[in-house]
Image (cartoon, grey):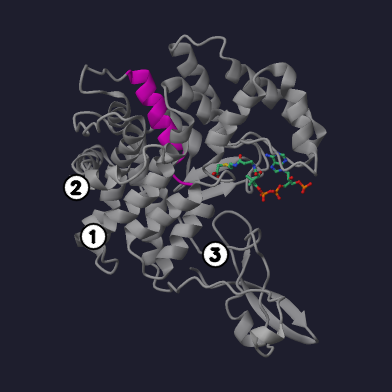
Amino acid sequence: MAEPTKSATLTIDGTSYELPIHTPTAGPDVIDIRKLYAQANVFTYDPGFTSTAACDSTITFIDGDKGELLHRGYPIDQLAAKSHYLEVCYLLLYGELPDAKTLEAFEKLVTNHTMIHEQMHNFFRGFRRDAHPMATMVGVVGAMSAFYHDSTDINDEHQREVASIRLIAKMPTIAAMAYKYSIGQPFVYPRNDLDYASNFLHMCFAVPAETYHVNPVLSRAMDRIFTLHADHEQNASTSTVRLASSSGANPFACIAAGIACLWGPAHGGANQAALEMLREIGSVDRIPEYIARAKDKNDPFRLMGFGHRVYKNFDPRATVMKQSADEVLDLLGVHNNPTLQVAKELERIALSDPYFVEKKLYPNVDFYSGIILDAMGFPTAMFTPIFAVARTVGWISQWKEQLADPQLKIGRPRQLYLGDTARDYVDIENR
Ligand code: CMC
């Protein structure tokens, strides 16, 4: 990090403190408060991290007002149109686009790690059939540290690399197995002659009894969904991975923590919640009722797939996702899909309603992804596991970046304590 050239002055009870200001390559300046407690004996208060930069990073940049998302400087719409998921993985992990030979070697490396330890099959069988696949994934990915001891030493660069590739390669296998287990079908082994997205579709939808041909348009749509979800800077699950990792936890434990965080409906769980909401609305004439509920302060209901902490404009991922939804439904000959009709009309109404306009609530990535995944044949419970597959590379890239930082410290937030001060224990008979 370059030496700060600016500073801010904070005055408390007549004493002033100089706080260095760091200037980023893009985005707002950052006031460095690391020495504030030692110097002034005060903490800062920012429970939802709305104004707090928890780390420095060179991976992903979002300009929420412009609706811009860059990975290593490359706009997401260009990556979605011209690149593919494994190339984006390489870019996120290593910082540059690979040349043809490097990309081929990287794809081969990932492909060679798609199978999971055979004994892990038994582990799956310990879950109830009706377990949510996210519950299964949290457990199975966490358990990888019990199966891959040779890639848990975070101080060994080679082991870190092996863990990274293993996670990116095996996550689709684990998600597909969670799905197969939940519907009572046999696990389908990965096929290394297929590309990443096609292999995932194959593992999810093939059965031993007949031949399954992967439709290239669906495979392209699947790849685009993976690409659009690959990373999103310091979101809740990525911050969870970084916090878990700051204690020195092994990579599989850290990624399991990220999956657990992603599951929530305010984060990755929103894609499942959004489609369920669209189905519940059911028809265009019921939209006003739901818009009214979303605006009612006394009703906890929110329009799922709308709003974002960072984007105060169109989520650029949603724009690509919407095009992709049209393409996939066209291909499948689904022209009068009621869910899509509700989605389009809901979007139109919300974008012109003063409540949503004033609060800058736009459709986010999760608004349209569910429609595509549903059309492909995935049940809603699989939507968030698919997000987890895609986001693994983002978590891993951020985890690697954090471990390479010589200033790494355990993450340990402070608090504004409002509880009782010290008081004497009262014996039970006197309470
Ligand atoms: N429907 C109705 N009102 C909303 C919505 C919504 N979807 N989102 C925010 N608001 C209102 C909210 O009530 C608040 O109003 P007021 O200022 O009057 O209290 C205002 O907008 C600001 O909301 P906030 O909760 O303070 O904003 P936040 O940055 O803490 O939350 C969010 C961001 C994504 C959690 C939220 O917009 C939300 O719950 N959206 C629905 C869930 C969703 O789609 N999540 C996926 C996010 S994108 C994928 C990912 O990152 O995982």
Spatial CA distance of label 3 from label 2 is 36 Å
Spatial CA distance of label 1 from label 2 is 14 Å
Disc 1: CA contacts within 10 A as few (<14), some (14-19) or many (>=20): many
Q: Which mark is residue 267?
A: none
Q: Which residue is mark 1?
A: 151
Q: Which residue is mark 3?
A: 54
Ranked by sequence position, the earlier of labels 1 and 3 is: 3
Q: Is residue 328 above or below residue 427?
A: above
Q: Amino acid at mark 1?
A: Ser
Q: Is residue 141 above or below residue 365?
A: below
Start and end of the magenta stretch? 215-233
Secondary structure under badge 2? loop
Q: Nearer the viewer, residue 51 or 264?
A: 264
- Ligand 1 has an atom within 8 Å of the beta carbon of the residue at disc 2: no
Q: Nearer the viewer, residue 155 or 90?
A: 155
Q: Pinpoint residue 297: horizontal percent, then vertical percent.
A: 80, 44
| Pair 3/2: label in front | 2
Residue name at image x 65 percent, y 83 percent? 428
Q: Which residue is mark 2?
A: 117
- Ligand 1 has an atom within 8 Å of the beta carbon of the residue at disc 3: no
Tell me if residue 297 is in the magenta stretch. no
The overriding secondary structure of the stretch rendered in magenta is helix
Q: Pinpoint residue 266: horizontal percent, then vertical percent.
A: 59, 45
Spatial CA distance of label 1 from label 3 is 27 Å
Q: Quadrant of residue 250?
A: bottom left
Disc 3: CA contacts within 10 A as few (<14), some (14-19) or many (>=20): few
Q: Tell me whether circle 1 and circle 3 mark residues in contact (CB < 8 Å).
A: no
Q: Going by the image, does 152 lie left or right of 4? A: left
